[in-house]
Image (tube, rainbow, N blue to C red):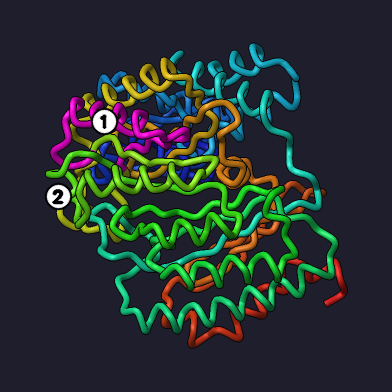
Amino acid sequence: MYRFYLNGIKNEYHLEELAREFLANDEFEIIPVDFHEGFSPRLTDKSYLLNGEKDADLDGVKRELYRILSNLTGITPEWGTLTGVRPLKLAFSVYDRCGDIAQTMETMAQKYLLHPEKIELLRRILNYQLSYMERPGTDSLSLYIHIPFCPTRCSYCSFASSVATSEEIAEYLEFLLREVEYTGAKFRKMGQLVESVYFGGGTPTTLEADQLGRLVDAIQSAFQLDLSRIEFTIEAGRPDTITRDKLEQIHEKGVNRISINPQSMNPQTLREIGREHSPEDIREAFRTAAAMGFRIINSDVIAGLPGETPDDFKNTLEELVSLGANNITVHTLSVKRGSKLKEQDPEYYRRDTENVRTMLKFSEEFLTAHGFEPYYIYRQKHQMGSFENVGYCKPEAHSVYNVRIMEEKQTIIGLGAGAIGKRYYPESDRLERIPNVGNSVIYKERFDEMLLRKNNYWEDRDGN
């Protein structure tokens, strides 16, 4: 057991998160202490004093711990001392102060010990957003609508979703439509603008075609949207839920961006992770979507799925590009609490990281060669190799919503069971979470409370 004594800094959480990138939970302790300057405690050969001079800031202590752990284990995580979800948000905060990309990257490298490959990735993403995107207006917001149902549950999934009957889905929709109307009535009094709409889940296309149409119509009417002027995304994630009728319905209504998310084109992998569709179902979904004329078709893939080889991953990416995806998100597998994979193998994320590194390197090189640029990034806990998730797109085929949710400079109104909204206060640059309960049954039971929570988006703007 390694013991790291943290002198004069009481918040050990970030140090614990960093240590977990090197060691298992039962291999270390971070112990806050308060030794006066010049005091030299007697330490064992597995004990270390951090911030012995009691003069370093938290980032300085994290650099000290990183170097000690690297020497002990031979591991050098490429994201350096960064353990948070949003590395680009930090880069933007530096850029906003200095106004120079090269200086921003130099500061990020020195302050957080990032490897050159991650510095270059951040540079490319920062450059893309500065080149193709405007910052959000102070009165703009986005809508997130959660459909908490899937045809089956994937082994790696920990999201608020479940398998439900058609009757349960129909009943849920009626409650959701009431929440949409209530929230829209509040919104219409405020003179704000909706920049993007995102239907996520779960799998929104578990709804039938007419149900999807009703929901899109309700959103358009309640929030007075001109759908020709905003980004409107529906995750059609599971190919076994995609039909021509559903795609025709949403395309005719004005939805201009969909996600078809195979995760892998390897049939054995699909069976392993609990999916019931085939690679041919994926191909047919793409053919149908292309015939409709959707402006942006996104696909998600996951590096590190059980049993996958780099060649399997390479085949998936090559086929998705050939099928016409112009926006591809490359995820690194995260072994999340609440997932079947976490129950079966809690330490899975610590293994096979070299194969994942190979997959991610291939994705960046291959997608760049085919005209894609990285445009947004985020990280997760218990992610294999402590790597990252990166969204790639053809120029101007990015997702506004994805960028906004990561930069945290805009209010996101969340509707439906499992939706977590966030109100942004620009004067203090802070967010306030406004969550709905995650379980669809409890959502219906506590529905009046969910409606009242919507008032928090505007309570000090209209006097209510």
Q: Which residues are magenta?
A: 305-333
Q: Quadrant of residue 106?
A: top right
Give left or right: position of 306 versus 444. left
Residue 179 visible, this angle: yes
N-term mark: 1 or 2: 1
The residue singled out by tag 2 in the image is 272
The residue singled out by tag 1 in the image is 46
Q: State the mark number for residue 274.
A: none
Q: Residue at x 44, y 44 (%)?
A: 291
Q: Quadrant of residue 340?
A: bottom left
Q: Nearer the viewer, residue 87 or 284?
A: 284
Which x, y percent locates residue 86? Answer: 53, 38
Q: Nearer the viewer, residue 342 or 362?
A: 362
Q: Residue at x 79, y 45 (%)?
A: 137
Hey, what amino acid is under mark 1? Lys
Q: Quadrant of the N terminus?
A: top left
